[in-house]
Image (tube, helix red, strand yellow):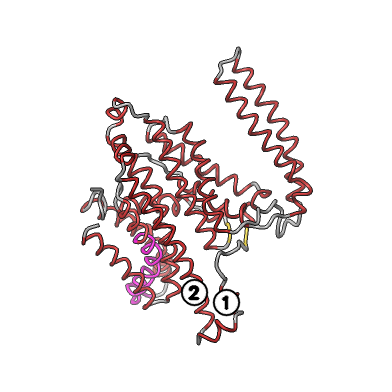
């Protein structure tokens, strides 16, 4: 890392500290925590795009799967729901998986009249699946629907859900990559975007799994909560304002956990970048034809790095859901979890891990602060205008300063530093 690179990181650190001094340390730590998570997401996308040139715009789906893993792993199981339909749900899912596996096997073996045979297998499997699944789903969703209506989770420690979130996202990436990675880059982008929306639609509509749009709340925390700290006489006696101190302590604890994960992933990616494997991936990215002529299996390597990058996004999604303490599928928006992550990678520097990390912190800081700063500036500029529809329209439009700022920032960076603030070397 050069002196210029270090100065950019120091600038971002100064901005976060300035937020704590000028606004509040709670907000500064909140920006820091989401900046750490955003940096991990940016590393996942940078692994796919910066190392291999894979244009994945389905980041949203893998982040959402990481969040789903937290709900399915750390929440306690709902005993009554398992009693009325859990076994049949598992049997139905096994039938569905078996049907798909059998259909794929028959198609690959080119059996006689395989089209008709595969269609018959799929139709029979679908009928059996729906016969088992529908009554079980209805029975589960009828169990205390206001608070539960789902199977719950495994009741495991929430930190275990982070690697499980990565594994769940990696499994989905394998299934997607086996079919989509043979497509051209623009078609791959369309395919990953569509699949991400399918994943989100399933999460929103399958209440039996994770309550759908009813949301999963009360996800266990790996750290003592602010309320628990406030109930401790020893903690309360140390601070003049124990309420503020408790929230800052919890957010600081999360920042340490997230920083550890970020450092581990960054070190591993740096080692991979400078290894023979990393040089091979960049050679494939720069010239697939030449790499194939040297005996490299392009599709296999693309699948490998697609899985790894998606797993990192899944881990980040699990961390974010843990930080929020709830799973809210309605908040997973492409603007925030795909477009914004790509802006981080492009502005920070595609192909450079330090650049992706810098972009994660800088863009998230701007995303949080631009709206209040824009509100202040527009209020200042319109102070002399008479009250009316025009002034109200300008004040109400302050929220759109976020999108305007992201666009202007991208244009400026691409004009004066086309390869990002910390370019690949």
**380 inside magenta stretch:** yes
Callout 2 crowding tier (Cα within 10 Å): few <14, some 14–19, many ≥20:
many
The quadrant in which residue 24 appears is: bottom left
- The first of marks 2 and 1 along the sequence is 1
18, above or below 403, in the image: below
Farthest top residue in view: 112
Please state if 193 lies on the left or on the right of 111 as rendered: left
**Residue 215 in sight:** no
x 41%, y 32%: residue:
300
First to last magenta residue range: 362-386
Give the residue displayed 33% in from the left and 77% down from the top: 384
**Circle 1: is it few (<14), some (14-19), or many (20+) Cα within 10 Å?**
some
Q: In which quarter of the view is residue 19 placed? A: bottom left
Q: Nearer the viewer, residue 244 or 256?
A: 256
**Secondary structure found at label 2:** helix
Q: Nearer the viewer, residue 376 or 155?
A: 155
User: Callout 1: helix, strand or loop?
Assistant: helix
Using residue 6 as the reference point, say whether residue 61 is left or right of it: right
Label 2 – label 1 distance at C-alpha: 9 Å
Q: Position of residue 119 (x, y in %)?
A: 63, 22
- Up-down relation of residue 379 to residue 281 (above or below): below
In this rendering, position of residue 298 left or right of residue 115: left
Vertical position of residue 34 compared to residue 193: above or below: below
According to the image, label 1 marks what residue? 229
In the image, is residue 374 part of the stretch drawn in magenta? yes
Residue sitting nearer the eye, 219 or 369: 219
Total tally of numbered discs in the picture = 2
């Amino acid at each position: 890392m050069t002196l210029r690179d270090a100065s950019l990181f120091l600038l971002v650190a100064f901005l976060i500290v300035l937020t704590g001094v000028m606004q509040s340390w709670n907000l500064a730590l909140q920006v820091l925590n989401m900046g750490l998570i955003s940096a991990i997401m940016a590393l996942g996308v940078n692994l796919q795009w910066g190392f291999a040139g894979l244009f994945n715009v389905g980041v949203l789906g893998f982040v959402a799967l990481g969040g789903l893993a937290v709900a399915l792993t750390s929440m306690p199981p709902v005993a009554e729901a398992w009693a009325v339909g859990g076994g049949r749900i598992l049997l139905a899912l096994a039938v569905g998986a078996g049907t798909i596996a059998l259909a794929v096997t028959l198609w690959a073996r080119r059996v006689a009249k395989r089209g008709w045979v595969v269609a018959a297998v799929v139709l029979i499997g679908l009928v059996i699946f729906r016969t088992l699944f529908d009554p079980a789903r209805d029975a589960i969703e009828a169990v205390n629907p206001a608070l539960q209506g789902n199977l719950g989770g495994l009741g495991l420690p929430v930190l275990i859900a982070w690697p499980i979130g990565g594994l769940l996202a990696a499994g989905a990436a394998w299934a997607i990559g086996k079919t989509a990675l043979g497509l051209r880059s623009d078609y791959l982008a369309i395919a990953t975007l569509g699949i991400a929306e399918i994943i989100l639609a399933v999460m929103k509509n399958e209440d039996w799994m994770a309550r759908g749009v009813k949301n999963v709340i009360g996800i266990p925390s790996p750290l003592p909560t602010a309320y628990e700290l406030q109930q401790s006489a020893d903690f309360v006696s140390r601070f003049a304002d124990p309420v503020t101190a408790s929230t800052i302590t919890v957010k600081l604890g999360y920042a340490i956990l997230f920083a550890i994960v970020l450092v581990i992933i960054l070190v591993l990616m740096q080692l991979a970048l400078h290894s023979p494997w990393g040089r091979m991936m960049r050679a494939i990215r720069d010239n697939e034809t030449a790499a194939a002529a040297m005996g490299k299996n392009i599709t296999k390597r693309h699948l490998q790095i697609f899985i790894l990058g998606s797993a990192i996004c899944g881990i980040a999604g699990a961390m974010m859901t843990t930080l929020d303490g709830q799973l809210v599928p309605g908040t997973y928006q492409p603007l925030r979890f795909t477009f914004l992550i790509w802006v981080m990678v492009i502005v920070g520097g595609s192909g450079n891990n330090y650049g992706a990390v810098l972009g994660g912190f800088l863009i998230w800081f701007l995303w949080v602060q631009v709206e209040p700063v824009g509100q202040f500036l527009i209020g200042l500029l319109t102070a002399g205008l008479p009250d009316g529809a025009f002034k109200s329209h300008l004040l109400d439009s302050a929220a759109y300063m976020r999108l305007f700022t992201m666009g202007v920032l991208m244009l400026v960076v691409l004009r004066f530093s086309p390869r990002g603030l910390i370019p690949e070397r």
